[in-house]
Image (cartoon, rainbow, N blue to C red):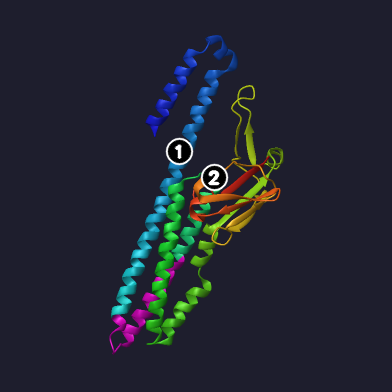
């Protein structure tokens, strides 16, 4: 990462050297360069910190999943004994309590991790994919636990009731899945989106090279919320559209509806993979 910064620094220095020294002095080129380098270092430090924290969460959750798997197998083996002693029954109850505790801890940790990623405003695709994979693993584990619950319930209703208690009080995986499937969209004219603090507009040099992007601290209230697994079409009032956020062109089609346009999403996972936010300028 430092090598990348070094190369960037060299490239910027070469550019600065080729310009007129007077111009550099008058425009504060060196100060701008130092500010940009400091900003890059700050961004990289924040990203490194987020990655390290996320890996800690990931390790803890994976460890809990492995413990659940081990206890699940031990419970299944123990329950095959036709003659369970009172100590065996108590051991099974204790194991069920520990499994439920680990399930609750995982659900809380994933929710905390997901919140950290959102609050940081850092778009790290690998980390977002990691959270999605964790939720899938937890959901698969819960399905296995439900099968075990049915098996143990046939031996003693108390076992099944303990699992039911988890379902009532735990942070459910379904809630996390819904949160991960939630995406947002906003559209309007360029002036409208700038005015409502959705996009940031930089005019470049004498109007050349104008750049438009989603603001760092954009106005969340100006977005509509949808479920990517349910909503496959987004209606836009206008015929000439310009995408501000990145969405693979192969993942959608634009369908004209009179003077308006419908964004027909062919592959939701690909469409929302780069950004959970869709911003469209109507021209």
Residue extending farthest bottom: 83
Q: Point out the stretch of residues depicted in magenta.
A: 78-104
Q: In the picture provided, is 273 more to the left or to the right than 190? A: left
User: On residue 121, which mark appears?
Assistant: 2
Left or right relative to 243: residue 150: left
Q: Are marks 1 and 2 in contact (CB under 8 Å)?
A: no
Is residue 272 visible in the rendered image? The answer is no
Image quadrant occupied by the C terminus:
top right
Give the labeled residue for mark 1.
45
Locate residue 158, reporting x and y percent: 43, 85
Q: Disc 1 and disc 2: Cα gap in Å?
A: 14 Å
Sequence-first tag of 1 and 2: 1
Give yes or no for residue 81 being in the magenta stretch. Answer: yes
Q: Is residue 223 left or right of residue 172?
A: right
Q: Give x and y (percent) for residue 180.
A: 52, 58
Circle 1 SS class = helix
Is the residue marked by circle 2 packed among few (<14), some (14-19), or many (20+) residues within 10 Å?
Answer: few
Given residues 272 and 134, the one toward you in this image is 272
Locate residue 83: give its quadrant.
Answer: bottom left
How dense is the environment of label 1, judged by Cα within 10 Å: few (below 14), some, or many (20 and up)?
A: few
- Foreground residue, 210 or 152? 210
């Amino acid at each position: 990462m430092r090598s990348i910064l070094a190369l960037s620094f060299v490239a910027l220095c070469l550019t600065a050297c080729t310009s007129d020294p007077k111009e550099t002095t008058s425009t504060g080129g060196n100060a701008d360069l130092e500010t940009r380098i400091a900003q890059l270092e700050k961004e990289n430090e924040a990203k490194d910190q987020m990655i390290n924290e996320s890996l800690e969460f990931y390790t803890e959750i994976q460890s809990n999943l492995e413990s659940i798997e081990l206890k699940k197998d031990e419970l299944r083996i123990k329950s095959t004994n036709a003659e369970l002693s009172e100590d065996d029954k108590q051991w099974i109850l204790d194991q069920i309590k520990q499994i439920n505790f680990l399930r609750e801890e995982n659900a809380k940790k994933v929710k905390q991790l997901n919140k950290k990623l959102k609050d940081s405003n850092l778009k790290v695709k690998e980390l977002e994919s990691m959270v999605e994979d964790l939720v899938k693993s937890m959901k698969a584990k819960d399905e296995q636990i439900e099968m075990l619950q049915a098996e143990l319930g046939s031996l003693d209703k108390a076992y099944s009731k303990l699992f039911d208690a988890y379902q009532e009080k735990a942070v459910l995986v379904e809630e996390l899945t819904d949160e991960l499937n939630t995406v947002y969209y906003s559209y309007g004219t360029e002036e409208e989106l700038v005015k409502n603090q959705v996009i940031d507009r930089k005019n470049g040099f004498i109007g050349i090279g104008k750049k438009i992007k989603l603001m760092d601290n954009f106005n969340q209230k100006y977005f509509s919320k949808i479920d990517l697994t349910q909503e496959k079409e987004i209606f836009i009032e206008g015929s000439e559209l310009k995408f501000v956020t990145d969405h693979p062109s192969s993942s959608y089609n634009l369908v004209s509806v009179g003077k308006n346009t419908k964004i027909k999403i062919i592959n939701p996972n690909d469409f929302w993979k780069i950004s959970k936010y869709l911003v469209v300028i109507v021209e």
